[in-house]
Image (cartoon, rainbow, N blue to C red):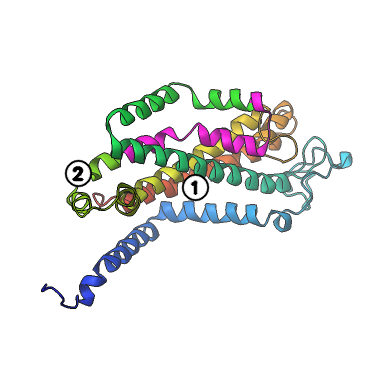
Amino acid sequence: MAIGAIPSPDLVYSAGGEAVARRSRVWRKLLRNPMALAGGFILLVVVGAAVGAPWVAPHDAAKQSLIRRFTPPMWMPGGNSAYPLGTDQVGRDILSRIVHGARISLIVGISAVIVSVIVGVAMGLVSGYLGGRVDVVLMTIVDVTLSFPQLLLALAFVAALGPSLVTIIVVLGLTGWERYARVVRAEVLALREKDFIEAARAMGVSASRVVFRHVLPNTFSSIIVLSTLQVAQAILQEAALSFLGVGSGRAYPTWGQMIALGRDFVSVAWWLPTFPGLAILLTVLAINLVGDRLRDALDPRVR
């Protein structure tokens, strides 16, 4: 193109058009995959129940009624249609507690992943782009952190700081950032030698602008896929901590807490631990189905 010539609209909008086309291809792949659709439907139900918990739940999750204790599910002899999944040892509605527990699980899972993304992506960008001693030091920290079992590390921190919703989110977030740091570092090491990065440097573009304008956007696919799968992992860890009695405390009903409280009555009221366990199973399965199919859809090598 001659100097001073007006750029062609096709050239101006080619990058944007390519991005739109890529997003369209990703959506088409997801919509054509029955497993992704099944997982997405389950997730919509769980998210909808969590968001609308005060209106969706048929009863107050904390309301006790010893007269109705151990009411079986409505399809069993002695069941009551007002309590579709039965009641627990103090007469609380199981379905209402599961619905409210979905809110806690999603809040913890998503918030913990946000904390991990912020810390891990920052570490990975700095380590991969600067390299040298900075890379060695940061990756050594990552290796040391990964040498500790994540659940035991979280258990120790929560036991020391005291159980609360904020503590659980911060602890799970700060014990899960290493994976993001490693993935982003690997992406940055591959990207920093690309021609467009070298061209930006040659034009005098600052390092921060290169990182945030050119390098970081090219790592979004990996970050999104990893984050999707890590939400499921955070939900499982929160349930494990609640089961052990060091979760978000007694102020909120959680799925792990419900399983822990119902395990002593499993021989007389099997539904107490079973339905919260199924809620965890379906939610984690749905997230994994969507995450795996999203990874396939975003990977250009998978056709």
Q: In which quarter of the image is the N terminus?
A: bottom left
Element type at mark 1: helix
Distance from Cα at disc 1 to Cα at disc 2? 38 Å
Residue under the point 65% across and 29% down: 243
Viewer-nearest residue: 90 or 235: 235
| Residue at the farthest front position | 204
| Residue 75 visible in the snapshot | no
User: Which tag is nearer the camera, tag 1 or tag 2?
Assistant: 2
Q: Name the residue under label 2.
A: 193
* Magenta stretch: includes residue 182: yes
Look at the magenta stretch and give its main secondary structure.
helix
Residue under the point 34% across and 64% down: 24
Q: Position of residue 70 (x, y in %)?
A: 79, 37
The three-letter amino acid code for the residue at tag 1 is Ala
Question: Relative to 155, is 288 on the left or the right?
Answer: left
Position above or below: 53 against 269 = below
The three-letter amino acid code for the residue at tag 2 is Glu
* Magenta stretch: includes residue 107: no
Residue under the point 54% across and 24% down: 153
The magenta-colored residue range is 159-185
Element type at mark 2: loop
| The disc label shown at residue 286, or none | 1
Q: Where is residue 38 in the image (x, y as percent from the top left)?
A: 47, 53
Question: Relative to 265, is 286 on the left or the right?
Answer: left
